Structure formats: structure tokens, C-alpha cells
Image (spheres, rainbow, N blue to C red):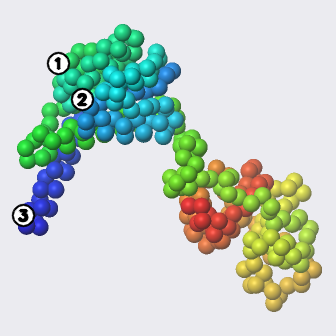
Amino acid sequence: MNRSKIKKVGQEVINLESIALSRLSKSLDKDFVNAVELISKQNGKIIISGVGKSGNIAAKIAASFTSTGIPAIYLNPVDASHGDMGIVEINDVLIILSNSGESHELADLINFSKKKKIKIISITSSKKSLLSKNSDINLILPNHLEADKLQIIPTTSTTMCLALGDALCCSVLSLRKFDKKSFSELHPGGKIGKKLKTLNEIMDTDIPIIQSNSSIIDAVLIMTEKKYGCVVVLDKSKKIKGIITDGDLRRSIANIDMKEKATSIMKSRPIVAKGDLLISSAIVLMNKYSITSLIVASQNKPIGIVNIKQCLEND
């Protein structure tokens, strides 16, 4: 097979699965809404099961739910039949993936759940399957062809199951108003956790501050001590009145008396940020205004300070 033929086969697979995903999107109906509401209201955990390739997809969907604050586990139906059935408890919701809906390995899990009156959501291609007939909510995959040349390897079907699982998870999050802060709390480590850190988590509370009646020499001394290349000027109410940077000093040094009030060279509208601003957004802000330090404030009162180096190390 030549290189162009290899590329063509790859494109055909992706195009075929893209068409299937488009059909899946259009097929979502009240059953999907019912499934989202059921998951959102559950008081137990989400148990997701499937056999073979469907099991691999089920494990990923369970991981997605768990990472967003919704307790979820993957349960292998074979393991369930050999001692792990006790994982399933009252108030849980069971989601079962099976393209055919006839996998015999699922029978014990389905029967056990029915006896315990545990709600079952099925993701399958057949409305008439054993799984569909024993489920409370059926999410039916639209007609599709598997993407391999024999049209038998789970490809298109598993792609649709994965996308449908993502759709369920994200829709539940929208109902629960899950935000970046909530996600960050569940991901304290790794690259994702770093990207979701806020200025509150890294800011220095030892802020270079002077009062509005301070002199320029006072500003220089504080600026040198704190090493942020700036000082924040406060008014009598301890609110931010302005800022003086080392650049302001260099530009003014030939024309100033060091005993003059610092407000004479002060910039009255410094760039400030709230403590819940993401570090990545703070970097964008500092680059936009060509500044290396950023004041963190609440109700126009300084609560911290960060510099570009700190932000880059934590981004």
C-alpha cells in the first residue's frame, strides 16, 4: 500500500466516525435528558460497566465523572459475577455499555441490579436487546457501520459510546454548576492542576507598601528591600492610590529631589487582579501591559503580589 492510500484509509475512518457522531448528536432526545437528571440527582455513586472494548470505554467514562466530583467506578461484569457484586448498592445508578445489548456476561449484573431496584441506563444499538428491555432509560446509538474494512471491529460504536459518555458527564456538570475552582481542588497535582491554580495560591502577602505622604527615598528603600521592582502607594483608608516602579524612578531620577513626596512620580491607575484569577490569565495580563509584577487586590485593598517568574514557574 502506497503512502497516499494509507492516508486515504485514515481519512475514510475519521470521516465515517464523524458522520456517526453527527447522527448521534441529532438523535439525543428526552431519554438523554432523563439520564442526565437521574445521574445529577443520585445520592450514591455511578457504576459503569461493559465487556471488552466497551469495558475500556466504560472505564474512561467513570474516570471522567470521578475527576469532576461525581463518585464513579468501572465494574467489570465478569468480576461482578465472581464476588464484586457487593460494590453495587442502593441509591447507585448503573450505566451499561454494549453495542449489541446481548453480551451474556452482563446477565448476572442486570439481574442483581433489578432485584435491588437499582436504576439502569443502557447505551446500546438495539431497542429490542436484552439490555434495553431491562433498563430504565435507553440511550440508543443511531445506525452505523464499524470503520474497519470488515466492519466488525468496535470502532465507530465505541467512538459514539465515548462521546455519549462525555455528553452525559458535561451535561451533569452544567446542572451542578461545576467550575474551574472545583476542578482544581480535585486536581492538585500534574499539569491540569497547575493550569487551574489561582493567584491566591502563589501570591506573596509581604507587599511592598508605602503611605501617600512617604518620600521618594522611602519608596526606593522599600522597593530595594522587597525586590518586586515596585511599591504600592496607599491612601488613608489603606486603599490603592497608585504604584511606583523602578522604571518610573529611572526615568525621573535626573529631575527629582529624593525628599519629595512619592506621589509626585506615582502612576495613579495600576493594573490589579483578583485573587481568584487563574495564573495563566495573569500571565496574559502582565504580557498585555508589559509589566513584571501584578498587585492582587480585594475591594481596592492590596492582599498580595506576584511577579511573572512566579507565574511561569507555576503555569
Per the image, the residue denoted by label 2 is 98
Q: Are marks 3 and 1 in contact (CB under 8 Å)?
A: no
Q: Nearer the viewer, residue 103 or 15?
A: 103
Q: Residue at x 49, y 31 (%)?
A: 71
Image depth: mark 2 or mark 1 in front: 2
Q: Are marks 2 and 3 in contact (CB under 8 Å)?
A: no
For the N terminus, the quadrant is: bottom left
Q: CA distance from mark 2 to mark 3?
A: 34 Å
Say what amino acid the circle numbered 2 marks: Ser
Q: CA distance from mark 2 to mark 1?
A: 13 Å
Q: Residue at x 8, y 47 (%)?
A: 149
From the viewer's perspective, tell me whether residue 96 is left or right of residue 88.
left
- Secondary element type, mark 3: loop
Mark earlier in primary sequence (3, 1): 3
Q: Position of residue 134 (x, y in %)?
A: 27, 15
Per the image, the residue denoted by label 3 is 1
Residue 122 occupies which quadrant of the picture? top left
Q: Position of residue 142 (x, y in %)?
A: 19, 32
Q: Residue at x 21, y 18 (%)?
A: 130
- Give the class, few, some or many, for how many residues have Cα within 10 Å of label 3's Cα (few <14, many ≥20): few
Image depth: mark 3 or mark 1 in front: 3
User: Is 3 situated above or below 132?
Assistant: below
Q: CA distance from mark 3 to mark 1?
A: 41 Å
Per the image, the residue denoted by label 1 is 128
Mark earlier in primary sequence (2, 3): 3
